[in-house]
Image (tube, helix red, strand yellow):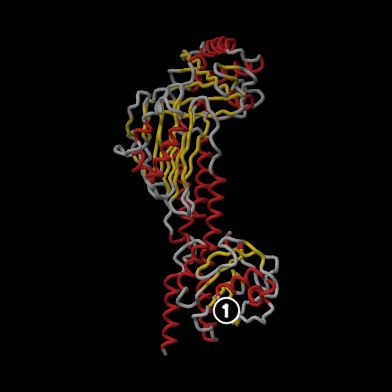
Amino acid sequence: MTGLLNRLALLEAVRTQVGHRTNVAAVCRELVDAVVPAFAGTTDVEVLDDVVRGEEPPTVPVRRSVPLRRAAHRGGISAHPVGDVRILPAGTPFSDVLSDLRPRLVPIAEADSWPATEPAGADAIRRSGAHSLIVAPLALRGQALGVVSFYRHRHEGPFDRDDVAVASAICAHAALCVNNARQYMREWIIASTVQRRLLPRPPSRQATVELSPLHRPDPEGGGAWFDAIPLPGARTALVVGDVAGRGIAAATTMGFLRTALHTLAALDLQPDELMARLNDTAVRLATERAALPPEDPLHCEPFTAGCAVAIHDPVDLICTIARAGLPEPVAVLPDGTSARLSVPPGPPLGEAGTAPFPSTAISLPEGSTLAMGTTALADEVLAATAPLRPLLADTGTTPLPDVRDSIEGALTRAHGTGEQLMLLARTKALPADQVLTTPLPASPEAAPTARRAARRRLEVWEVDEETACTTELIVSELVGNAVRYGTPPLRLRLIRDRMLTCEVGDAAAGAPRVRHARTADETGRGLFIIASLADQWGTRYEARGKTVWAQQPLRGHHVRGGEIP
């Protein structure tokens, strides 16, 4: 009776102590800690190397060439160090167990032949004084995960058949825990890979904004992302987002939202409208998740996401910001003063309803630094009393990557937990000699006036003849449409950055559209001509009216500070 009670207590200890960790090696360490010395003097756990990396375990019989990793050891002398990877020699109880998944009680005697096939193991057994061995498989549903070896020594009684049954029960529970850790590892690898591939590459050098992202991934994977999207007129959309949850679901949802955001940004929407349409996409994704079968793990997980969008205009030095579920950004001015930006909060993305996402236009002088972060960083970096704020206040002189590194080091010292992401953006102004702004009369004279002004500036910029002729034609058609259908005041703007942008603004809210004029029609071809000549064109709506723009690539010309590709 005493023996039975001891065995039951041992099995209960194994069930309560093994399986708390999500790492295969950690689970194996929990196993040896639970059974030594309560059940065996020495225990070794060897796991298939593919299983440690999260791969699917093979079915029996396992190929002889499959390598195993020594995952855990406790007790006497070990023939191989923990972490060692090797192929099991044929003809030993360890390799035999992987062929049929049957546990074996192995008395160790001098006359046995199998130790000769593994001299290092035989020497360790002899020096430790082991005299009794149980080799049991780690297996689940006919798939082999590894092998566990239990040894007893001189001062311990030999194993018997009842002990084999106990060892089998121990390994059955351990196999379930090891497989759970393997599946977690596989999902983590996939989620981390998906998120890493979906995140933008390190931002390229831009003329109007310097960028430096700080991203500290969660060990379990997450859904945080950032973006810097070039917009017409040398503007840049700065984006920080965070999908609630972890793992593959959060990473793939982040991919959906990021793709939708890029598509919406191509429409040149203002941040408030962009956020509202992005929320429409998030609501549809949340509805689809809620419609999943109840047994689907995603069915019970709430769908929420946060996002902040800031559009930096390097000509007017205005930053227009909207946010949904993320903390207020912080701006650090060139004189070192800093403040939270009073951007009204919108609801988290994915919540059904008609709540608006109000935007705020803020004047940021050249050399200002904008810090946008996920909620996990709000208390430590963006809060008014955070000890890390002095690091941001030095951005006027310190290179932005150095500021980021200092913040990351401070976060490490502060033991921040969870996924953390922050985008630092230092604003730059587009040089005045790269911009032409001309008011236009609301009369037929507007088109000739605009053409003359454009021609003079294109000559100063030394734009090639073909591009200059095309630009004059685009300017003429844009201004002609504004005079015919727009409302004063009218304005022409030429911007020379990586692209040559022509903008014509007026106070009317009506949207221009491409018409397909008939052969005998004398009008109606303006936007059709622009669409044929320009690389891109579109309309941007503002608080007072709209701006119709068209872009062309520049070829081999120079601006102050370097060549435009």
Q: Position of residue 419 (x, y in %)?
A: 44, 48
Image quarter of the C terminus = top right
Left or right of 267, for residue 370: left
Vertical order, 173 against 331 (above or below): below
- Horizontally, is 158 left or right of 329 in the view? right
| Residue extending furthest toward the front | 127
Circle 1: residue type: Leu
Residue 348, given in percent of the width and then of the height, sits at: 39, 47
Note whether residue 139 is visible.
no
| Residue 450 image position (x, y, % from top left) | 53, 13
Query: Residue lying farthest bottom?
Result: 1
Quick one: which residue is furthest to the left in this view? 385
Q: Is residue 437 left or right of residue 334?
A: right
- Tell me the quadrant of the picture where the N terminus can be found: bottom left
Q: How many marks?
A: 1
Above-or-below relation of 40 to 49: below
Q: In this orientation, does residue 466 appear?
A: yes
**Could you say whether the residue bearing mark 1 is in a helix, strand or loop?**
strand
Q: Nearer the viewer, residue 435 or 426?
A: 426
Q: Nearer the viewer, residue 125 or 43?
A: 125
What is the crowding at mark 1: few (fewer than 14 residues within 10 Å), some, or many (at least 20)? Answer: many
Q: Which residue is mark 1?
A: 133
| 497 vs 166, nearest the viewer | 166
Foreground residue among 61 and 80: 80
Residue 558 in the image: state x and y as whole percent.
Answer: 60, 17
Name the residue rendered at 43%, 33% in the picture: 403
Quadrant hosting residue 83: bottom right
Vertical comparison of 209 with 182: above or below: above
Q: Is residue 20 above or below residue 323?
A: below
